Structure formats: C-alpha cells, structure tokens
C-alpha cells in the first residue's frame, strides 16, 4: 500500500520512536554490566586480586613450553598460587612476618659466605634444607619456585627469598638438563624452607578454606569469568 506523501514524515517519526522504545525495553531485560574496576581480576571474601599479581607467573607459563590457553594458565595461577597465598597471608600474618625475617637473615648470611649453591647446601643443612633427590621437572615445584629454578642463567646461584603459599624459601640449582622442549627441562634443586605448614597440613587447610570461600565471590572481571578455578564456579 502506498502511503500518501503528506503522511510519510509523521509515519517515519513514529517508526523511529517505536524502534527506540523497543531498544530501551530490550536493554531493561539485560543484566547490568559489572562496574569497571581497572586492573582487578576478582574480589572474594574482601580479598581483591589484581592483574599484576598474576602477570609474572603467566609470563613464566608462556615461556615454559606448556601448550595451554590463556584461561587455563590464569586458572592455574589463581588456584595454585595467588588465591592460597592471599588467604594464607591474611590468616597467618604474624607467623609469616616472623618467617620472612628469618628467611631474609638466612639469605644474607649465604650471600656473605659466597652466594652459591655449595654455601646454601652447607648452611641450609642445619635448618632442614631439602634436596630435590635428583633431577625433577617443573610440576614437582610450586609455580613461583619453578619460575626461578627453570632459568638456565640461575644455575649455581642462590635465589632471593621466594614467597609461596606455605611461606618462604631460598633455593639453588646445581644441575640443569634441557629437554627436547622447554616443558621437558629438568633441574637438581635445593631449598631451605621457612614454612607455616608441611605439605599435607597445608593441603588440608586449603581444602577446608576453599569450601568456606566457594560462596563468597563478590565480583569478577568479565574478561576472567571463564578462567576461574572450578571450585569458584
């Protein structure tokens, strides 16, 4: 049907108005976007995790030869390092502060005596130093430990104090055997631990805390929504 020319402007305005109204109604049905929080990954139980906390270990994973996607890498860093570390820092603050002082003082004493693998092993023996028991791969270590140990230039050297979820450690590498691919590299490492818990006790504590934290995720950056550990979903 042909619309008379004189009615066309009014009809056009009505169509535009109806289109605008439809768009507004559609937007009302969409969930509101979370407010922008630049640099923030998530907030859980009052703990705000920021992107800079993930970046060093994400760089390590990218360079390690592991063929995993970004979401899987972020999930690993959150689950294995950042979240247990941040919760432990809050719950064991006084104990960790004391351990950090002891680890720093020990590191200085090793530096003063030569700052190399033999000195760390000698001085660390009386403090419960732990040899790796031969060549081991990346998965046998904490992410932050592996990020230092699997750098060939660190062979024979002593690490700075490394903070991990269980506390702190000082490490050295006596042997580095490159694999056919970087993911297959092996090292003979030594660590002097300054930990709040042994492995089994810390694992039990973290399992309990995960159950308590599972319902306390209050904000997540949409860019990281697909990278959350499974216990947070």
Image (cartoon, helix red, strand yellow):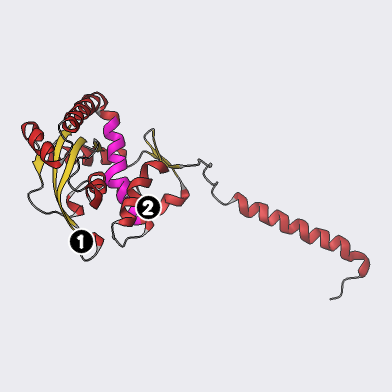
Residue 98: % across, % down? 21, 24
Secondary structure of residue under mark 2: helix
Magenta stretch secondary structure, dominant? helix
Q: Tell me the crowding category of disc 1: few under 14, some 14 to 19, or many 20 or more residues within 10 angstroms, Cα based.
A: some
Mark 1: secondary structure: helix
Question: Residue at 25% across / 50% down in the picture?
Answer: 153
The part of the image, by quadrant, that contains residue 83 is top left
Check disc 2 and report the residue beneath it: 227
- Left or right: where 7 falls relative to 191: right
Q: Which mark is residue 91?
A: none
For the point 27% across and 41% down, the residue is 210
Q: Farthest residue to the right: give it.
A: 6
As rendered, which of 11 and 78 lies closer to the eye?
Answer: 78
Quarter of the image for residue 128 reads top left
Does residue 1 appear to the left or right of 232 in the view shown?
right
Closer to the camera: disc 1 or disc 2? 1
At 28% from the left edge and 43% from the top edge, which residue is drawn?
81
Q: Is residue 151 visible?
A: no
Q: Is residue 7 above or below residue 197?
A: below
For the N terminus, which image quadrant? bottom right
Asked whether residue 133 is drawn in magenta, I would say no
From the viewer's side, name the closer residue of 191 and 48.
191
Q: Is 157 situated left or right of 45 in this image?
A: left
Rate crowding at label 2 as few (under 14), some (14 to 19) or many (20 or more) other CA atoms within 10 Å: some
Bounds of the magenta segment = 72-89
Q: Which residue is mark 1?
A: 184
Near-viewer residue (199 or 151): 151
Q: Position of residue 51 (x, y in %)?
A: 42, 43
Residue 113 seen in this snapshot? yes
Give the percent coordinates (x, y) of residue 159: 22, 40
């Amino acid at each position: 049907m042909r619309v008379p020319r004189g009615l066309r402007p009014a009809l056009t305005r009505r169509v535009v108005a109806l289109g605008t109204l439809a768009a507004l109604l559609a937007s009302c049905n969409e969930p509101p976007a979370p407010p922008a929080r630049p640099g923030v990954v998530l907030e859980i139980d009052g703990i705000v995790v920021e992107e800079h906390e993930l970046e060093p270990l994400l760089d390590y994973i990218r360079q390690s030869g592991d063929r995993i996607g970004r979401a899987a890498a972020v999930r690993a860093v959150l689950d294995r390092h950042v979240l247990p570390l941040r919760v432990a820092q809050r719950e064991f603050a006084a104990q960790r502060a004391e351990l950090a002082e002891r680890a720093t003082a020990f590191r200085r004493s090793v530096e003063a005596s030569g700052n190399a693998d033999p000195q760390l092993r000698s001085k660390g023996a009386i403090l419960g130093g732990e040899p790796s028991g031969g060549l081991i791969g990346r998965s046998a270590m904490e992410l932050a430990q592996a990020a230092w140990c699997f750098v060939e230039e660190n062979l024979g050297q002593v690490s700075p104090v490394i903070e991990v979820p269980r506390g702190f450690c000082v490490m050295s590498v006596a042997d580095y055997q490159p694999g056919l691919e970087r993911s297959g590299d092996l090292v003979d490492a030594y660590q002097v631990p300054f930990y709040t818990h042994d492995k089994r006790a810390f694992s039990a504590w973290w399992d309990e805390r995960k159950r308590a934290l599972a319902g306390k995720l209050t904000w997540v950056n949409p860019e990281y929504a697909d990278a959350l550990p499974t216990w947070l979903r």
